[in-house]
Image (cartoon, helix red, strand yellow):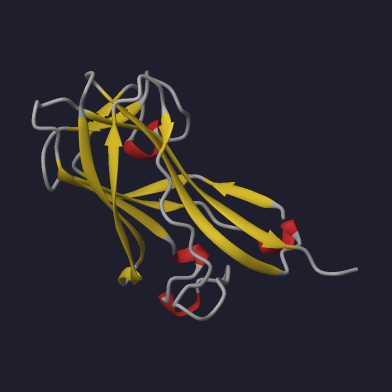
Amino acid sequence: MPTVDIFPDGIINNDWTVVGTGTADVVLLDNDYYNYLKSDTDTEYFEMTLGALDSVALNIDTITSIQVHMWGDHGARGASSTVTCDYRNSSGIINSYTEDIVISTAGAHTDYPFTARTTSDGSNAWKDDGSGGDGQVDDLRFRVTMDTADTGGADTLITQMYLTVTYTLPST
């Protein structure tokens, strides 16, 4: 099935430290150790909006799933932290789509994906129009909250984030 990646395009809130050049949403566009977000403090969070999905240009028939990819690492060996990750819209968390993800030192950027979600509300497929603010793709946001920072004080690094939309094409 075809996929398309949608990158952050705006900031709702950012308590994490921006390292490198640009705003919080800009440093998450590429996956490097020159531009990233870092935190070592419980309850700090960032929330981003995403660019628009153009289902007409992509000829999307049905959206089969969405999944946020969060690339990260730690600033010291043997470190780990837990972040709480939410799929959100302008009204808040979507359908209890929240989870804790443990980020451990890997020595390299590692993908810590959110759980892929096949429905916007537990039963209906995602739509790209964002109508009604009900968690549709055009109204989608993601939030990452430091839940349990590394006890040794090591920074948790988030180097890139994006949403992957998997979809089908119309039958011909």
Is residue 171 in view from this perspective? Answer: yes
Q: Does residue 171 appear to the left or right of 12 in the view shown? A: right
Q: Quadrant of the N terminus?
A: bottom right
Q: Quadrant of residue 150?
A: top left
- Residue furthest out toward the right: 172
Between residues 128 and 153, which one lies in front from this camera angle? 153
Is residue 13 in view from this perspective? Answer: no
Between residues 121 and 89, which one lies in front from this camera angle? 121
- Residue furthest out toward the front: 78
87 shown above or below 14 = below
Residue 33: image x %, image y %?
A: 37, 19
Residue 85: image x %, image y %?
A: 30, 53
Residue 47: image x %, image y %?
A: 30, 51
Q: Quadrant of residue 161?
A: top left
Q: Does residue 172 appear to the left or right of 116 in the view shown? A: right
Between residues 24 and 93, which one lies in front from this camera angle? 93
| Residue at screen point 44% across, 62% down | 140
Residue 29: image x %, image y %?
A: 46, 34
Q: Quadrant of the C terminus?
A: bottom right
123 shown above or below 15 = below
79 shown above or below 3 = above
| Residue at screen point 56% across, 62% down | 65
Q: Does residue 140 appear to the left or right of 106 in the view shown? A: right
Q: Does residue 8 appear to the left or right of 107 in the view shown? A: right
95 shown above or below 69 = below
Numbered label tally:
0
| Residue at screen point 18% across, 42% down | 15
Q: Quadrant of residue 149?
A: top left
